[in-house]
Image (cartoon, grey):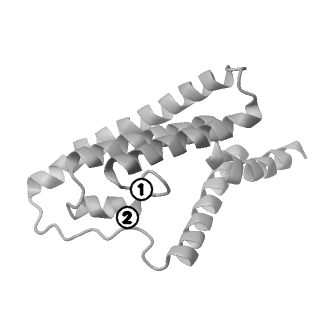
Amino acid sequence: MMESICHLAQVLIASVTATFVCHIFLGEDPAFVIPSIGHLSGILYVLVIPTAGLAALAGAAFQKGTLIWRDRIKRIKRIPFFLKPAVGAAMNWLIGISVFFAIGKIGVFGLGYGDLEKMFYGSISGPQAILLAIAKFSCDHCRLCLGRCWRDLFAYPLLWRCNRSRLH
């Protein structure tokens, strides 16, 4: 029971912190503006269910693939563990700069809200959107498997507090 409360506390603290930081630095509307799409038909509401299911499967596949890749990378002894984040950053930069030179978009770096908003308004073509999605997917894998940036910043201090409370 205590372990599940610790995990829930980590999620709540991380989400509140992220919301607070976004509000400070990005203002009232930190995300993108979605254009009006007009009247929705009943068939579109029905299509939401399989679309959500496909999104859930894609998320599960991404998570499983990331964990498998991370385990394989841990076994590589030619690269010292302290240099692996630098390798991940270099791979991110190479992918991002390649996409920038290919199509002139920087959506691979950062959150990509600007390019995502342009996609909603039809300013980015289908092939450009596919290239951005594949590049972002690849960069996220590199970041999570080699750099582990997300875990090092927030989860370790929270995990340490939860584990320390169990030790006493």
**What residue is shown at x 44% (from left), y 50% (from top)?**
108
Disc 2 from disc 1: Cα separation: 9 Å
What amino acid is found at the position of numbered circle 1 in the picture?
Ile
Please state the horizontal and vertical placement of residue 17, each as a whole percent of the image: 62, 66
Locate residue 48, reporting x and y percent.
Answer: 22, 50
Q: Are the residues at dot 2 and dot 1 in contact (C-beta closer than 8 Å)?
A: yes
User: Of the residues under marks 2 and 1, which one precedes in the sequence?
Assistant: 1
Three-letter amino acid code of the residue under disc 2: Gly
Give neighbour class at mark 2: few <14, some 14-19, many 20+ (Cα, 10 Å). Answer: some
- Per the image, label 2 sits on a secondary structure element best described as helix
**Quarter of the image holding residue 130?**
top left
Please state the horizontal and vertical placement of residue 138, each as a whole percent of the image.
Answer: 45, 38
The label number, if any, that marks residue 106 in the structure image:
1
Q: Which mark is drawn over residue 114?
A: 2
Vertical arrangement, residue 8 with respect to residue 65, above or below: below
- The image shows residue 133, relative to residue 29, as above or below, that is above
| Left or right of 119 on screen, residue 96 | right
Query: Could you say which is closer to the camera, residue 155 or residue 6?
Result: 155
For the point 28% across and 68% down, which residue is it?
Answer: 34
Q: The N terminus appears in which quarter of the rendering? A: top right
Picture quadrant where residue 33 is located = bottom left
Secondary structure state at the residue bearing disc 1: loop
The residue lying at 59 percent from left, 70 percent from top is 21
